[in-house]
Image (cartoon, helix red, strand yellow):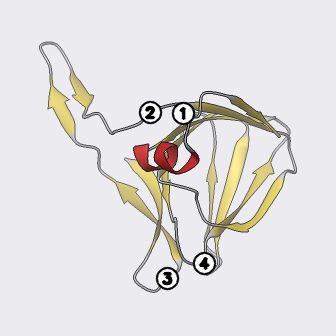
Amino acid sequence: HVARLYTGEDGQSHFGSLELSYTEMVDSIVPKVAVATGVEFRRSPDGTVFDWHCSPSRMYMVSLSGQMEFATNEGEKRLFGPGDVILVEDVTGGGHTTKCVGEWVRITVVIPWEEYVRRIGRSPTHFCIM
């Protein structure tokens, strides 16, 4: 399962889970490919806080190191660490906050979906150092 952060019909952000679709290959079963056009690496030191915001687009976030706490305005919090994957798609509504917790620098691979590239006019292939 992949965690999911989405905007509900009430206009607020909620957590859920996503069952991946898989395609059978000769010797293995792999997830079907989502449309993504770039990759971004983010580095966030412990204690970094991002106040209320919506995601700029639908994107997968894959945690490589450190921990990040996501919180909705309903008070629900989830902690994501190394190996965790979340599909962030609350592009409208109340949004969420994020906070780096623990003693390790958080490094995340961000894989935005195609509409992000159309909106900013380039593929996100740069390193975002925060």
| Residue bearing mark 4 | 94
Q: From this viewpoint, is residue 85 visible? A: no
Give the side of residue 4 with respect to residue 81, left or right. left
Which one is earlier in the sequence, the residue at label 1 or at label 4? Answer: 4
SS label for mark 3: loop
Identified by mark 2, the residue type is Thr
| Structural distance between the alpha carbons of marks 3 and 4 | 6 Å
State which quadrant residue 70 falls in: bottom right
In this view, the residue in front, 106 or 34, is 34
Residue at 29% from the left image edge and 50% from the top image edge? 19
Residue 26 in the image: state x and y as whole percent.
12, 13
Numbered disc in front, either 1 or 3:
1
Q: Are marks 1 and 3 in contact (CB under 8 Å)?
A: no
Residue 90 position (above or below residue 60): below
Q: Are marks 1 and 4 in contact (CB under 8 Å)?
A: no
Identified by mark 4, the residue type is Gly
- Residue found at the very far bottom of the displayed protein: 10
Which one is earlier in the sequence, the residue at label 1 or at label 2? Answer: 2
| Residue bearing mark 2 | 37
SS label for mark 4: loop
Q: From this viewpoint, is residue 90 visible? A: yes
Which one is earlier in the sequence, the residue at label 4 or at label 2? Answer: 2
Residue 92 in the image: state x and y as whole percent.
52, 72
Q: How dense is the environment of label 2, judged by Cα within 10 Å: few (below 14), some, or many (20 and up)?
A: some
Q: Quadrant of the C terminus?
A: top right
| Structural distance between the alpha carbons of marks 1 and 2 | 6 Å
| Residue bearing mark 3 | 11
Identified by mark 3, the residue type is Gly
Which one is earlier in the sequence, the residue at label 3 or at label 2? Answer: 3
| Residue bearing mark 1 | 123
